[in-house]
Amino acid sequence: MLRKISLLVMLVMLVGIVAACAAPADTPADSDTAAPAAESEAAASDAPVVGIVLPTKDEPRWIQDETRFQELLATENVPVEILFSQGDSAKEKTNVESLLTKGVQVVILTPQDGAAAAASAQAAREAGAKVIAYDRLILGTDAVDYYVTFDSVAVGEAQGQYLVDKAAGSDNPLYLYAGASSDNNAFLFFEGAWNVLQPKIADGTFVIKNSSEAVALQDKAELTRDEMASIVGQVTTNWDFNIAKSLAEANLTVATAADKGDVFILAPNDGTSRSLADAFAADADVTSYVITGQDAEKASIQYIIDGKQSMTVLKDVRTLSADAIAAAMAYINGGTPEETATYNNGAIDVPAKPSAVVTVDQDNVQATIIDSGYWPASDFTGLE
Ligand code: BGC
């Protein structure tokens, strides 16, 4: 057994070296196959050991992950193939199946739809591959081996806390927005935000302006999944910039001038935050707004510098991608990745390693984003 494993390790290293030598410096931006090893003509390039399936190239967040994986793999010598599902669960399943056909030993998957992805996880289990849920949990199956993630409840709490810290007095108009109902994270973010905001709604600091479902539940400190689903269903952006924009416009159309003024907006992530911010900024009755976000996308860092978005939550994708590759290598080498928590996915408690998150606004953008090396200063204008 031991001999088998060490042979395997040697093979992995050898394949990695061959693949790394053959790797092109750059890959086409619109290519679905993005890992350095994947496009080589060499035999090794046809044999990824690890397959990564990310949700979409239409959101900068997931391009960040692709880039960080590529940076990491440039030094790791692991043959990896990265595929994108473009917001389509059926394409996601085909992607996983194609990687399994190529013989990957580990699938790292960010599901488009947590429940629908159970079938892909089961297919991987049947093929003998380990399954690592990446950032978003795969739901309702025992075929998930590990979950690398950020502390998503803490993300929501950071967003809620930011709004609370910026609000003075009472009756501050509050507009709530959420992510996609098919994404378990949307619930964790909302749960975190609600933990912090609900007491401040109950004491009159905030008044919810755009969700009758949230108003109906505003005296409840802890919401059930179904209760959260009723609110999320009413204020979902589906993680889509255009839906976020039209939803905000619809909310602002029915709101009276008295519902506007100095407003507070819970925006679930950076992409939707920029759309929501633009819609609120365009309304003549909105005098000022405080708006949240997450992901530290470059465009949102610029919005923060320019005073158009109030904050973001930095989820350092360098850590997440490194944790995912470390977990994959642990499995390939016959071990088990580090477990610091578990997340129940409706079927089992999935071993996990959640990472900490950092609130970023104008006051600390230099330290958290530039000085930390997350993004170079030259990518932005107006930094002091
Ligand atoms: C991720 C966020 C991302 C959102 C939309 C969530 O599951 O955790 O970082 O902004 O999906 O893609």
Image (tube, grey):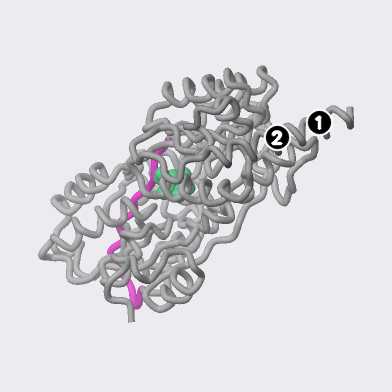
Numbered circle sitting on residue 12: 2
The residue located at (23%, 45%) in the rendering is: 247
**Lateral position of residue 227 relative to residue 109, left or right:** left
Q: What percent of the width, then of the height, locates residue 161?
A: 46, 67
**Lateral position of residue 152 relative to residue 124, left or right:** left
| Foreground pick, 187 / 127 | 127
- Nearer the N terminus, badge 1 or badge 2? 1
Which secondary structure type mostly characterizes the magenta part of the structure?
loop
Residue 69 shown in magenta: no
**Mark 1, residue position:** 7
Residue range in magenta is 167-181
Quarter of image, res 357? bottom right
For mark 1, give the secondary structure. helix
- Can residue 305 be seen in the rendering of this structure? yes
Q: What percent of the width, then of the height, locates residue 302?
A: 30, 66
Quarter of image, res 282? bottom left
The residue located at (37%, 32%) in the rendering is: 86
